[in-house]
Image: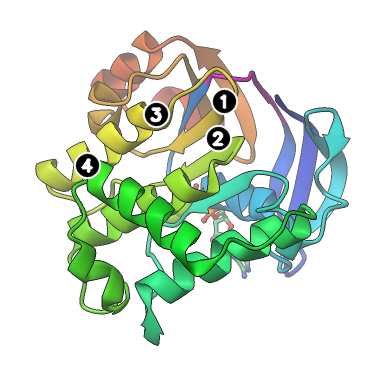
Amino acid sequence: MLEIKNLSAEIDGKQILDGLTLSVADGEVAAIMGPNGSGKSTLSYILAGKSDYTVTGGEILLDGESLLDVPVEERAARGVFLAFQYPLEIPGVATMTFLKAALNAQRKARGEAELTTPEFIKRVNGAADALKIPREMLRRAFNVGFSGGEKKRMEILQMALLQPSLAVLDETDSGLDIDALKIVADGVNGLRSPKRSFIVITHYQRLLDHIVPDSVHVLSKGRIVKSGGKELALELEANGYRDYQEAA
Ligand code: ADP
Ligand code: MG
Ligand code: MG
């Protein structure tokens, strides 16, 4: 499980997170909502280990072990997966090659043997077929020229291959049409498991019609100011964030 305790963080001397406390159990899907600029992306970057942020207080425990001490390149091996709002494009690197490198880096960091090419191809084709990703796409440069929906499918494919224990989706729904939204939701729902925790960050309720969260948390001015069940998201949709803007 994930335990974030009293986490404070700053960037370029500006305090962004201010005593954020949040627990996400194994198997739980926690939604984080909140106004623009409240620190949602900052939290996801800190979980992923992005170095621009300075943690000034508090701790993050993943299955009882401090995550903040784990270097960024080892976080995937520890089971952390971050899906970005704007997925990376890598010209000149075939999707297949990128996925193989990501999976083998994770295996190496875990002290596991690299997958042989036939083993990898079997695995990636199986995962791609399950997500209805045409195999032809795996030969194209990673994300280059992919539509919004195709990039989302690719992200779910990465998640399916890496089998994270903590998956963080940061506004992965913004700008998506309803079909792409459903791809993300079906992908996440298909990967829900008693051992996996999700943090779904979203500004709108819409995604949560398809990924029904176990808990909803409002982030305002760098801390969680309210937590509840899935009905809290509906309340936010109806009333907006005005009740929480001043609360922190
Ligand atoms: P959210 O994802 O909730 O919209 P962010 O985590 O992206 O919020 O940003 C939180 C706050 O941090 C915002 O006020 C933003 O302007 C500020 N911020 C982000 N990067 C920097 C930076 N490099 N220097 C100063 N402030 C920053
Ligand atoms: Mg933002
Ligand atoms: Mg953001």
3 or 4: mark nearer the eye: 4
Amino acid under label 2?
A: Ser
Say which quarter of the image contains residue 124.
Answer: bottom left
User: Mark 2 and mark 1: span between their CA atoms?
Assistant: 8 Å
User: Mark 3 and mark 4: span between their CA atoms?
Assistant: 31 Å
3 or 2: mark nearer the eye: 2
Dot placed on the residue nearer the N-terminal end, 3 or 1:
3
Dot placed on the residue nearer the N-terminal end, 2 or 1:
2
2 or 4: mark nearer the eye: 4
Relative to 196, residue 145 above or below: below
Left/right placement of residue 105 relative to residue 198 reads right
* Helix, strand or loop at mark 4: helix
Magenta highlight range:
21-28
Q: Residue at x 77, y 65 (%)?
A: 13
User: Mark 2 and mark 4: span between their CA atoms?
Assistant: 29 Å
Q: Which residue is mark 4?
A: 183
Dot placed on the residue nearer the N-terminal end, 3 or 4:
4
Q: Residue at x 19, y 37 (%)?
A: 182
Amino acid under label 3?
A: Arg
Q: Contact (CB < 8 A) between labels 4 and 1?
A: no
User: Mark 3 and mark 1: span between their CA atoms?
Assistant: 9 Å
Dot placed on the residue nearer the N-terminal end, 2 or 4:
4
Q: Contact (CB < 8 A) between labels 2 and 1?
A: yes
> What percent of the width, then of the height, locates residue 121?
40, 61
Q: Which residue is mark 2?
A: 220
Q: Which residue is mark 1?
A: 247
Mark 3 residue crowding within 10 angstroms, few (<14) / some (14–19) / many (20+): few
Q: Which residue is mark 3?
A: 242
Dot placed on the residue nearer the N-terminal end, 4 or 1:
4
